[in-house]
Image (spheres, helix red, strand yellow):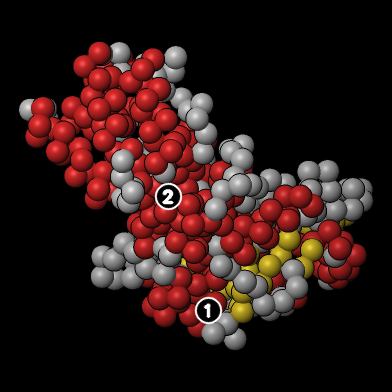
Amino acid sequence: MLTVRFAPSPTGFLHLGSARTALINWLYARHTGGKFLLRIEDTDRVRSDKRFLDEILADLEWMGLDWDEDPVYQSRRFEIYRKEAENILRAGKAYKEGEAIIFKVGKNRVIEVDDVIHGRITFNTDQIKDQVMIKSDGSPAYNFCCVVDDIYLKITHIIRGDDHISNTPKQMLFYEALGLPPPVFGHMPLMMGPDGAKLSKRHGGVSVEEYRKEGILPEAMVNYLMLLGWSPGDDRQIISLEEAVKVFDVKDMKGVQAKFDAQKLRWMNGEYIMAAGTGKLLPLIKGQLVSAGIDISGVDDGYLAKLIDLYRVRIRTLSEFVALTGCFFKDDFTMDEKGKKKYLDKADNKSNIGIFADRIEGLEDFSHENIERICRDIAGETGLKAAEIIHPTRMAISGKTRGAGLFEMMEVMGKEKVIGRMRKAADKGAGA
C-alpha cells in the first residue's frame, strides 16, 4: 500500500510551503487509496512547543486534511535510534567519537535517485562527509532518525521540497546500512515570492494561521496551494479537494519553481465567498467582527445575513467585511475626510439630504425599491442628477464614498437610523 508522511516541526506556525507539502502528500495518498501519516519532528526540546503543534494540527484539520494513524513523536524514540545506530556500529560501518556515533561514508561511489518529479539525479559520495547518527548529547541526527522512522512507518514514497534533495543520498546510505531498499523520492520545487526570491514576510503572510485570521476560506487555500506546480490538465482555476483527489498524480507535478501570489489567493477566496452559502459564512463573519472588537451581542442573525448578502460580492477576504460594514454596527464610524469635504460641507448637498430624509420618512414600506423611487422623483423634480443626492447621502449614513448599493444599504440599516444620520448631516454637517 502506498504510504506517505508529513513531518512538521513544532517550533513555529505552519508555513505555507509546509502546508503545500502536506496537501500534496494527502492528495497522493487519497488518490491511490493509500495512507497519510504524521511524524512530529520534536527532537529540539528547547524550541519545540505544544502550542505550535496544536496550531499545526488545527491548521491541517482546517484545510480538510486527515491522517490515518496516531502521530509518531521523535522525542519519544531516542532509545530506538540509539539501538539502531549501535547495530550499525557493531557491523563496522560506523565509529564512535566520544559519545557520538558516526557513520562512515565510503568514497568514490555514485548514488542515483529516480526522482518522480525531476527524473534521475546523481550524487558522488566524495562530496558527502561522514554522517553523525547520534550526537554527543544523545539526541539523534536528522537524517538518521528520519530513516529509522520511515522504515518503522513503512513509508513507500517521500514527497517533499527541493531543499531536501541534498539529504536524499545521505538517507539512501542509511537505508543500505540497515539492509532495506529506499522508498521512492519526489522533490517539489519550493514556493517563491512573485519576484522569484524565497518566500518571506515581505511577500505577505507566510503562515497558514495568518491567512486564516485574515479570512481566507480553507477551500480557497487548498485550491490555490494545490495549483502551485500541478494542474488538473484543463486550465481550471477552481477545483475542490474532492475533485482533485480523483485526478491527482504526483507524476504530473512540474519541476519548476512555483510563485506564490497573495493577490491571486485573495481573488480565488473572493470566488469562494461569492459561491458560499450565507449559513456557512455567518459564523465566520461573526468571528471576524468579534475579533475586531465589535459588539454583536444584540445583533440579530437575520440582520447579519442581509449584510453578508449585500457585501459578499465586494470582499475578497472575510476581514474586509469588517472594514466595509462598521457603520452598520456603531454610530461613531470613521468619516472619510475628503468625502466629507466634497459632499457634506456644501449647503446645497445638506439641503438635498434634508429633503430626501423628509420624503422617505413617510414610507411605510422602507424597501430599497421605494427609497430609490423617491430619490429619482426628487431628482426629476429639481433637475438634479440622482448622483447628486446619492453620494452625499452615502457619506451621511456610512462615512464612505463607496460601498454597496445605497438604497440596499438604507433598507438593511433601517429607517430610524438612516433618517437620524441624514438629519444630523443636513442640520449640522456630519461629525458635528
Identify the element where label 1 is drawn. Answer: helix
287 to 416, vertically: above or below? below
Task: Point out residue 301 in the picture as x, y percentages from the top left corner.
Answer: 53, 56
Q: Is residue 132 visible?
A: no
Task: Point out residue 421 in the picture as x, y percentages from the top left corner.
Answer: 41, 29
Residue at 33% across, 20% down: 426
Front in this rendered view, residue 381 or 219: 381
Amino acid identity at mark 1: Arg
Amino acid identity at mark 2: Leu
Q: Residues within 10 Å of mark 2 (few under 14, many from 20)?
A: many
User: Could you say which quadrant of the image residue 124 lies in?
Assistant: bottom right
381 to 365, vertically: above or below? above
Front in this rendered view, residue 6 or 276: 276
Residue at 48% across, 52% down: 303
Write down the residue under mark 1: 30
Q: In the visual, does 91 lie left or right of 369?
A: right
User: Could you say which quadrant of the image residue 111 lies in?
Assistant: bottom right
Q: Indicate which disc, 2 or 1, sits on the residue closer to the N terminus.
A: 1
Write down the residue under mark 2: 307
